[in-house]
Structure formats: structure tokens, C-alpha cells
Image: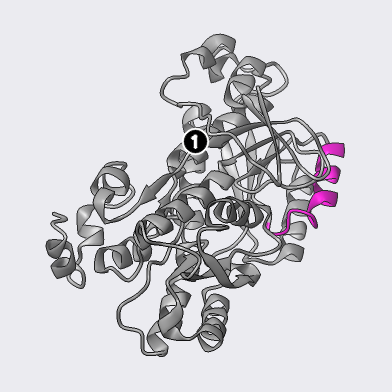
Amino acid sequence: MRRIAISVAASTMTLSLAGCGVLNASGSSADASPTKGNDLTVGLLLPETANTRYAKFDYPIIKNKVAELTKKQGKVEYANAAADADKQARQMQQMVADKVDVILLDAVDSHAIAGEVKKAKEAGIPVIAYDRLAEGPIDAYISFDNELVGEVQARTLLEALGSNADTSDKVVMVNGSPTDPNAKQFKSGALSELNGKVTIAAHYDTKDWKPENAQAEMTEAINLIGKGNIAAVYSANDGMAAGVIKALKAAGVTAMPPITGQDAELDGVQRIVTGEQYMTIYKSYPAEAEAAAEMAVAKVQGKDIQFDALTQDHVDSPTNKNIPSQLVTVTALTRKNIKSTVIADGIYKLSDICDATYKAACAAIHLK
């Protein structure tokens, strides 16, 4: 078993969903424990709408997987907090009142939600932290290896700068929301690669991950450093990368410096095709979401062997230690591997990326 702290992640171990034959050791969903059969309800609390992944991937994948695991008898009660921590607290209170069987929680504010996690626990409802590690007595955690995300972003950025990169190269860091524990891990991983190799000339923690906030921050950085003196921009995700690019364009920059991203949003992939954005982090959302659904169903139905097989990592939060977890690895997506990642995995069709607007750009990089 591995243990990592919320501030220092160090595991790249992942559990292949396709290779988990051991998971059947405690039986299929037809062999559910007497306490709960297939007629279960999973509460799903997602954090915001600015990132399109939640509505397009996470919710439908979890919903479909729960239906598959329960012979279409189980259901998902879904709510999105739209980046409002108070709203998410009310949504969680409602789910507790509705007596859902288990809650998958992707917290807006990992610290502020701790009290509601405790109330759910007191009501006998297990809480699994999904994608972001919430505080309080959660039963399990599933996410991507977040420090690895930052490390891969930074390494790819350094590769883009080339072998002559040194501390004379000025980099702007546009990090994620200070209320999101994942953002701190992304930043920590990135700094572990960037420190001593380039100069961080300006850095920001971007409220609510909003692209417009990133745009304002980048405008400030341009005024501070000078548009011609920025060698690269570390942006923690694709939405903020779009704001960064808007700011650079508004300042008259035509040839973009290397800019990172995360989430492999369609717009981000298309910007990579045109060269406006250098890379993004591709995460297998189906792997994360399906495993989360399996964990939730196994927890409710008392399938301890299956649950343990899905949570072979362990992490510490600021409030709880040794939390059973699964950490999923990630991939750097650049022009070179669009076809072997998001297209091969069925996230997007070639026609989605190379529509009429991007057809010529796709042809120019031989993406066809």
C-alpha cells in the first residue's frame, strides 16, 4: 500500500478496470448484501459548469455505469453547484434529507464542506470524494494523480522551450482556485519541475478557475513583464488557457508562447491543432467515472473485496488519515498524439475536432 499526503502526492499506481477479474470475488450485483439490493440511489454532487467535462462526461458516464451495475434498477440523483460552496452545502443537505444511499462528492470548497460530510456520515450515508479530496470523514477518494499532472505539464513546457531553457526565461503561472485542493497539488508538481530551471516572473491563484479571471491576471502579467519577455505560460487548465490567449491577443501577440492546459476540452484540443496552445493534460474520464460508480455501488451493497480492490492507494487529508483511494495516471496531449488519445478513446470524433473552421489546420499537421 502507498500513502500520500494531500500536499505531497507520490503515486502513479493505477488499477485497470478491464483487468479487475478479482472484483468478482465477492459476487456480481445480483449477489448484493441483504441490506441493500440493486434499487439504490447514488447522490452525485459536481462543482461547477465552467468546465464542460462535468455535464458532458462525468455525470452521464456515472449514470450509465450505475444503471449497468444494478440491472437498471439503480439511479443517480445529480446536482451541480455552479462554483457556489453554499449552494453545494444545501444540495448535500437535501440529499441527506432524501436518504440517498451513497454520495459522490466533488467539492467546490474542500474545507467548507467538511461539516456536511460529517452530517452525512452521522445519517449513515457513505461519502466518496470524487476528483477533489474533501475534508471530513469521507469513506474513499478517487482522482487523478494530481501532482503528476503538474509535473507532466511543467516537463512538457520545458521541452517546448528547448534544451537552451534557463533562468533567463520568464514564465507566468496561472494556477487554479485556492479553494480547490487539486489546484495546490497541480502547482506543487509544476514547481518541482520549474524551480531552478526558469524564472517564475508572475504567479496567480485564480478564483473559481474562471477564464475571465485568468484573462485579467494575464493582462496584469503582460503589463508587469512586457509581452515580448514572456517565454511561456503555465495555465492549470484549458478554460484558463483560453483566457490567457485572449489577453495575449489583446496585447498584440500573434505568435503564442508555449501554453499548457488540462482536461482536453474540445476547444483546447482545437487550439493545440492551430498552435495557440501547446499542450493539455488528457485524463481518462471514463476510467475515473466508471471506477467511482463501481466504488459507490460496492460500498452500498457491502462488497468489501470489490471495494478494497478499487481502493488500493491511500491518502491523507487535513482532517483524516489513511483514506482508501484510487489514483489514476494522466497523459500529455500535444499535436503528436491527438489521434492516439482522445480520438482513440472515443472522447471526440475526428470530425468534431476538424470541423469546417479547423479543417485546414488539421490538414496542415496531417491530422486526418
Residue bounds of the magenta highlight: 108-123
Q: Quadrant of the N terminus?
A: top right
In the image, residue 327 above or below residue 187 = above
Question: Going by the image, does 312 lie left or right of 264?
Answer: right
Type of amino acid under label 1: Glu
Say what secondary structure mark 1 lies in. Answer: helix
Using the image as rendered, state which of residue 171 and residue 327 is in the foreground. 171
Q: Residue at x 52, y 83 (%)?
A: 225
Q: Residue at x 25, y 60 (%)?
A: 353
**Is 121 contained in the magenta span?**
yes
Q: Residues within 10 Å of mark 1 (few under 14, many from 20)?
A: some
Quadrant containing the C terminus in the rendered view: bottom left
Expressed as whole percent of the image width and height from the top left, the position of residue 136 reads: 81, 44
Res 277 → quadrant: bottom left
Is there any visible trace of residue 243 in the rendered image?
Answer: yes
- The answer to whether 281 is drawn above or below residue 12 in the figure is below
- Classify residue 162 by image quadrant: bottom left
- Residue 330 pos. (x, y %): 45, 43
Residue drawn 49% across the image and 56% down it? 55
- Residue 33 spot, x, y in % from top left: 67, 16
Query: Badge 1 is on which residue?
Result: 290
